[in-house]
């Protein structure tokens, strides 16, 4: 990652989208300090303590604030310990943080399972007895155990069937309203991002290239990479087709990115300046930031 900067409003769902390997998951893991960033600031605004610098916390401070920040991983088949029952999986954060035990723990696990649409009668079963969608519900129950305010959802539906994706997305929306949650929603599926998110940031090779409110970004993209991503969204009517923008070449290595604009070798609008000077992320309209030399000149195609 290089110069990634954004603000997630309380109660919103902020989408982070881009091709595989662009740094989306690394960003999410740095925010909650599963990975230690080599530089920069991660600021959490606490209702009582005000702005807290997550990147400066020691392990003891981090343990306290981690209760407010949780993560749901992409693959529910590998993120749940196959040797533990549902009661142990969902109750583990409560036990580690010494919140409750015994009958109180069992009651809290039952409450969390009901909240995600699972039966408390199944709390003594193991993960292998559940489908992918049910496992992701278990992951959500575990993430909710300590009443967090902020959840990093790292591609939470990409490993699920399409019909199950809709169920999990609806559940996440209901949980957000019920528990007053704020999401950082990481995905590569633009259709899911449009449905789930209030704001969107587009990443390419470790950098943000465009951020805006969701509807504005989909209707009026201002970066060529965003336009290419939007062109890949299928139309609901199979009789109509959207012109697909196929990007030439491969995604460059973040360890050795091209000079100038990182996207210029694959951009059909690139000019000489793009290979020489790196564009700055600038605000071209209220709350709409773009990193492109020609953002105000290009007429790019969005989606209806």
Image: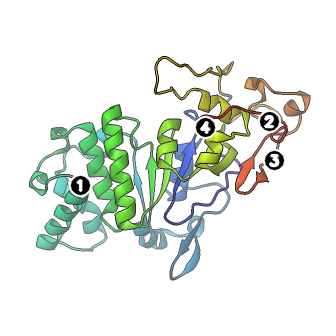
Which quadrant would residue 267 be assigned to in this image?
A: top right
Residue 214 seen from this side: yes
Query: Which mark sits nearer the N-terminus, 3 or 1?
Result: 1
**10 Å neighbourhood of mark 3: few (<14), some, or many (≥20)?**
few
The colour scheme used to paint the residues is rainbow
Q: Which residue is mark 3?
A: 280
Q: Which residue is mark 2?
A: 261
Q: Which residue is mark 1?
A: 89
Is disc 4 placed on a helix, strand or loop? loop
Label 3 and label 1: CA atoms lie apart by 45 Å
Figure check: 292 above or below 4: above
Figure check: 46 above or below 34: below
Query: As drawn, is 228 to the left or to the right of 149?
Result: right
Q: Closer to the observer: label 3 or label 4? A: 3
Query: Which mark sits nearer the N-terminus, 3 or 4?
Result: 4
Task: Please tell me which residue is depicted at 65% across the width and 22% down the height of the picture.
Answer: 245
Query: As drawn, is 246 to the left or to the right of 79?
Result: right
Label 1 and label 4: CA atoms lie apart by 31 Å
Query: As drawn, is 114 to the left or to the right of 223?
Result: left
Q: Which residue is mark 4?
A: 22
């Amino acid at each position: 990652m290089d110069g990634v900067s954004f603000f997630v409003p309380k109660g919103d769902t902020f989408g982070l989208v881009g091709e595989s390997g662009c740094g989306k998951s690394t960003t999410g893991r740095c925010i909650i300090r599963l990975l230690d960033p080599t530089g920069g600031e991660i600021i959490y605004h606490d209702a009582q303590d005000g702005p807290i610098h997550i990147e400066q916390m020691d392990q003891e401070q981090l343990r306290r604030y981690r209760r407010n920040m949780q993560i749901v991983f992409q693959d529910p088949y590998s993120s749940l310990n196959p040797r533990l029952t549902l009661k142990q999986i969902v109750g583990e954060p409560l036990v580690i943080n010494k919140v409750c035990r015994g009958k109180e723990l069992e009651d809290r696990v039952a409450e969390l399972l009901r909240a995600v649409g699972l039966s408390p009668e199944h709390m003594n079963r193991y993960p292998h007895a559940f489908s992918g969608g049910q496992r992701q519900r278990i992951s959500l129950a575990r993430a909710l155990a300590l009443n967090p305010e902020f959840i990093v959802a790292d591609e939470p539906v990409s490993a699920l069937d399409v019909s199950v994706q809709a169920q999990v997305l609806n559940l996440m929306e209901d949980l957000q309203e019920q528990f007053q949650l704020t999401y950082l929603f990481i995905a590569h599926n633009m259709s899911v991002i449009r449905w789930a998110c209030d704001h969107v940031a587009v990443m390419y090779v470790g950098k943000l290239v465009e951020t805006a409110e969701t509807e504005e970004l989909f209707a009026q993209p201002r970066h060529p990479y965003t336009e290419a991503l939007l062109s890949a969204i299928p139309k609901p009517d199979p009789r109509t087709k959207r012109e697909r923008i196929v990007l030439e070449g491969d995604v460059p290595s973040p360890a050795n990115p091209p000079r100038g604009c990182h996207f210029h070798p694959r951009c059909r609008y690139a000019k000489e300046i793009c290979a020489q000077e790196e564009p700055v992320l600038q605000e071209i309209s209220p709350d709409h930031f773009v990193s492109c030399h020609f953002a105000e000149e290009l007429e790019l195609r969005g989606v209806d």
